[in-house]
Image (cartoon, helix red, strand yellow):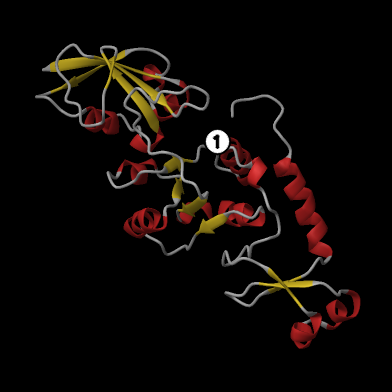
Amino acid sequence: MSYAEFRFYEELNDFLKASQQKQSFRVSFNGHPTVRAVIHTLGVPHPEIDLILVNGWSVGFDHRLVHGDRVAVYPMFETFDITPLVRLRPRALRRTAFILDVHLGKLARGLRLLGFDVSYRNDYDDPEIIRRAVREHRIILTRDRRLLQDRAVQHGYWVRSRHLEGQMGEILARFDLRGQINAFSRCTVCNGGLAAVPRAEIVKRLPPRTRRYYDRFWMCPDCMRVYWKGAHYHHLLRRVRRWCAAPQGGRS
């Protein structure tokens, strides 16, 4: 039986047992497994890793361990240029688009409310999510860390918070999205982009009170839903402003 000494840094500790967090610990193994295989057995998904050092040298996921190796594992770097090293995460996608698992329906609607391209259906299974993420160049957001351990996943993030407010703040900070917000520009139900529509074209579809008091309307060309700034709009606007506000301290 051989062993290697592992140390995980920053938010990667969220995936570890309490006895393994923020300190070095030994992992036993037989033969010469890849560093990716051992990291997965510890519950850490590879899309959240940006750099691995073995005995001080930068290595890839397929590097095979030997007895006595010292392994340091780092998350995505926001401010440091590690280009000369083996950067493990693919470059950031030029277009910020997401696909969410079945557990994140409220988060999907919240991100769409802020104008982000979000693919979500409550009947997507894991293989379908992965296929669409790869084909459509989307970032997977999930509450199931096992989904991110599939080798095909390149861009993904395990959502830590269980509640919508925490999730929204977490995703906006993690992907630095506040500068990209374009609220009320996307259908929150089907993800289509909204376009202004003349009142005359949809007036027969409107409730009597709406017909009487409102003149400006937007329609989703995909599902044909009509939107206007009704009483619910001001509640949504307060929510948007709260999410757009920069957090006061705390980990981003």
Residue in front for this viewpoint, 98 or 235: 98
| Residue sitting at the far right | 213
Label 1 is placed on what type of residue?
Arg
Q: Quarter of the image holding residue 123? A: bottom left
What residue do we see at 49% from left, 60% from top?
120
Q: Position of residue 59 (x, y in %)?
A: 26, 24
Total labels drawn: 1
SS state under label 1: helix
What residue do we see at 82% from left, 67% from top?
230
The answer to whether residue 206 is left or right of residue 117 is right
Q: Position of residue 51 (x, y in %)?
A: 36, 25
Q: Position of residue 2 (x, y in %)?
A: 13, 16
Q: Name the quadrant of the N terminus.
A: top left
Q: Name the quadrant of the C terminus.
A: top right
What residue do we see at 78% from left, 53% from top?
237
Q: Position of residue 97 (x, y in %)?
A: 51, 52
Q: Quarter of the image holding residue 190? A: bottom right
The answer to whether residue 178 is left or right of residue 228 is left
What residue do we see at 75% from left, 43% from top?
242
| Residue that badge 1 annotates | 174
